[in-house]
Amino acid sequence: MTISPDVAAESTRTPRRQRLRHYAMTPPTFFTVEYAINPWMDISTPVDVERAVAQWQNLRDTYRRLGHTVDVVDPVPGLPDMVYAANAGLIINGVAIVARFKHAERQGESVAYANWMDEHGHHPVATRHVNEGQGDLLVVGSTILAGTGFRTQPQAHAEVASITGMPVVSLELVDPRFYHLDTALTVLDETTIGYYPPAFTDDARTRLRELFPDAIEVASTDAYVLGLNAVSDGKHVVHPAQATGFAQQLDRAGFHPIGVDLSELLKGGGSVKCCTLEVFP
Ligand code: ARG
């Protein structure tokens, strides 16, 4: 008898375990699309701030309902991209690496986020090279996956390795729509990721296949709605609702997908993960 792949996957389903998390988020009070620094941004598209705030509140409430802690950072007028809190930096192992942004339009955010880190006892440290925080620096188990190609510079990967004492795996991105690592790859638990292979160089793909043989590879329809810009607690995966194919893949792999609508924030080129900075213990 032959077993269909679905049934086989079902029978080997890994039990997924939730670990409670600590996040920081910044409301889109001053959100606009008034400059274009990635292909998703179109300054002629109007933004509905009230709707953006309501969508953001729903995301925050979803995390809180799941039992997670969410700190809210004060937004600053004139910094419309501050809502993408993932880019603030990387807080781990008792250090807070503050972002150094590539584009002048976002550089003021570093000061705002460094102040917030300081006030919360996180000891901000700067890098000499461009690093866009958890947009390009994703923690999986005890390793950091680091994106480059569009924003974070490879020299910053070396700085991050020496500041954190953690191994850093550099992954080069090739498609401008997937300009940050968190637009093309999501960490699902300590050993599992989801990703979109065409967003990476051949070398990066080979490396990912070696490191994550059980990875979920998503289709372009899901990647093109930023479906991978998701946040997992090891069991529940909060993801952009439009990524329905990815949701099915998650379900088959034993995760619990939770779709949320962040269509207003997509106009700035970000979604669930972009709006969420995880604060590691
Ligand atoms: N407009 C922002 C930029 O281009 C979006 C950042 C999205 N954040 C992320 N973590 N991918 O920088």
Image: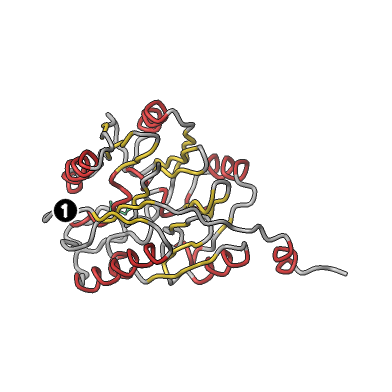
Question: Residue pushed farthest front?
Answer: 67
Residue 221 placed where, x, y %?
Answer: 49, 67
Q: Quick one: which residue is furthest to the top in this view?
A: 162
Quadrant of the rendered image containing residue 252: bottom right
In the displayed structure, 216 sits above or below 62; it is: above
In the figure, is residue 249 to the left or right of 13? left
Q: Position of residue 279 (x, y in %)?
A: 36, 46
Of residues 244 and 37, the one drawn nearer to the viewer in this rendering: 244
Quarter of the rendering occupied by the C terminus: top left
Percent x, y of residue 86:
33, 50
Asked whether residue 46 is in view, the answer is: no
Q: Nearer the viewer, residue 163 or 249?
A: 163
Asked which secondary structure carries label 1, the reply is loop
Label 1 crowd bin: few (<14), some (14–19), many (20+), radius 10 Å: some
Snapshot quadrant of residue 202: top right
Q: Disc 1 marks which amino acid?
A: Leu
**By what rule are the colours in the image chosen?**
secondary structure
Front in this rendered view, residue 195 or 176:
195
Q: Is residue 247 left or right of residue 275?
A: right
Q: Is residue 177 left or right of residue 30?
A: right
Residue where numbered disc 1 is placed = 79
Apparent side of residue 57 relative to residue 6 in the rendered image (left or right): left
